Image (tube, helix red, strand yellow):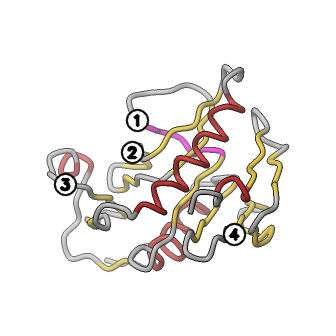
Amino acid sequence: MQRGGLMSLVRYTYEDYVQWEGDWELIYGQAIAMVPAPMINHQAVIVAILSQFYIQLEECEKCLTIANEDWKISDDTVVRPDVVVVCGKFDKYITKAPEIVVEIVSAASAKKDEKIKFKLYEDEKVPYYILVYPEDKKAKIYKLTNGKYEKIGDFLEEIHAFEDLTCPVRLDFKRAFKKI
């Protein structure tokens, strides 16, 4: 069986996933081990982005930003994005498409983030997907347009405003990369 560029002989479900030890994602029934503990630059960028969104969303009663939380897409797909902005009703884990998904890309996660998750998030209609490359101090922002991601651009020190969200936010990439 092949879905989303993944080939799996064994098909796991959410029931299997919740029993596993360690850090895993489940994509189209295939168990994918998360990379080892992230490097300091990876974590520093997560905190910088998370804190920017958190401060801006403090007064928004409909949205919040969280990091490393399970998003149960279906019974055979559970991912754990680095940072998300979610709006609406909340459950014990994310159950609907976030408005923004941020993945911090490393050499070990590049294929999964740039290809597999890119297509998955596009199919799930995530309005914005941000790929962040700490080693290059660069980010790529993609916006869902007519069901497909279109690249808005590469960002190094710029500020991008996400005006069309439930609660608009801005992301200052100079601040995001300041500590690395």
Residue 123 image-quadrant placement: bottom right
Q: Is there CB contact under 8 Å for labels 2 and 1?
A: yes
Residue 16 placed where, x, y %?
Answer: 18, 51
**Secondary structure found at label 4:** strand
Side (left or right) of 145 relative to 177: right
Residue range of the region highlighted in magenta in the rendering: 94-99
Alpha-carbon span between mark 2 and mark 1: 6 Å
Of the residues under marks 1 and 3, which one precedes in the sequence? 3
Residue at label 4?
Answer: 140
Picture disc at residue 145: none
Main secondary structure of the magenta stretch:
loop
Mark 2 highlights which residue?
A: 70
Q: What separation in Å lies between label 4 and label 3 (alpha carbons)? A: 29 Å
Amino acid type at mark 3: Gly
Near mark 3 (Cα within 10 A), the count class, few <14, some 14-19 or many ≥20, is few
Q: What element carries label 3?
A: loop
Q: What amino acid type is highlighted by mark number 2? A: Asp
Nearest-to-viewer mark from 2 and 3? 3
Q: What element carries label 1?
A: loop
Mark toward the start of the polypeptide (2 vs 3)? 3
The residue lying at 40 percent from left, 54 percent from top is 79
Between circles 1 and 4, the one closer to the viewer is: 4
Q: Residue at x 64, y 60 (%)?
A: 177
The answer to whether residue 135 is above or below residue 173 is: below
Q: Do the residues labelled 1 and 4 touch (CB within 8 Å)?
A: no
Q: Name the residue under label 1.
A: 93
> Looking at the image, is mark 1 or mark 4 earlier in the sequence?
1
